[in-house]
Amino acid sequence: MADSKLKHEQIQYIEFLSKDITRAKEFYTQCFDWKFTDYGPEYTSFTGDYVDGGFTYGDPVNGTVLVVLYSEDIEATKNKVINSGGTIVKDIFDFPGGKRFQFTDLDGYELAVWSL
């Protein structure tokens, strides 16, 4: 992922559920020429011109796309979420690309924040 795409606290990554990740990869490669990197049988990430994201195995349901924001300071962003009334649903954890946490906003929408 190019560092030029990293903008502090902006939407930067989107995750989708798919019952057939291979089929999803074929579709989005043909439609948008997205490039994929597999991380086991139940997760693949994609890179596009202006957005990156991933597909994880699961039954798609309207409203299940996970919006992921980038943060230069994940602890400070987490504190802003808490102080604004958000609820942390997955505390900061490590993953192959860095660190991440997930929260719900005041309407119950779940989002994530990641950092290098």
Image (cartoon, rainbow, N blue to C red):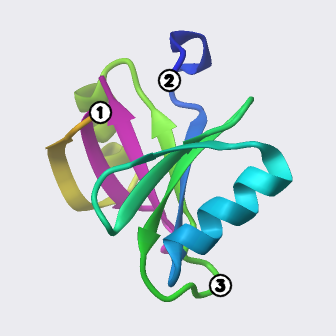
The secondary structure that most of the magenta stretch takes on is: strand
Residue, disc 2: 1
Numbered disc 2: secondary structure: loop
Depth check, mark 2 against mark 3: the one in front is 2
- Measured as percent of width and height from the top left, residue 40 is found at 27, 59
Disc nearer the start of the sequence (2/1): 2
Say which residue appears at 37% left-offset and 45% top-offset: 81
Residue displayed at 61% across by 60% down: 25
Quadrant housing residue 5: top right
Gap between marks 2 and 3, in whole Å? 28 Å
Label 1 sits on what residue type?
Answer: Gly
Q: Which amino acid type is marked by label 2?
A: Met
| Mark 3 crowdedness (10 Å alpha carbons): few <14, some 14-19, many ≥20 | few
Residue 23, x across and y down, in percent: 62, 73
Return the residue at label 1: 97
Magenta residues span 98-116
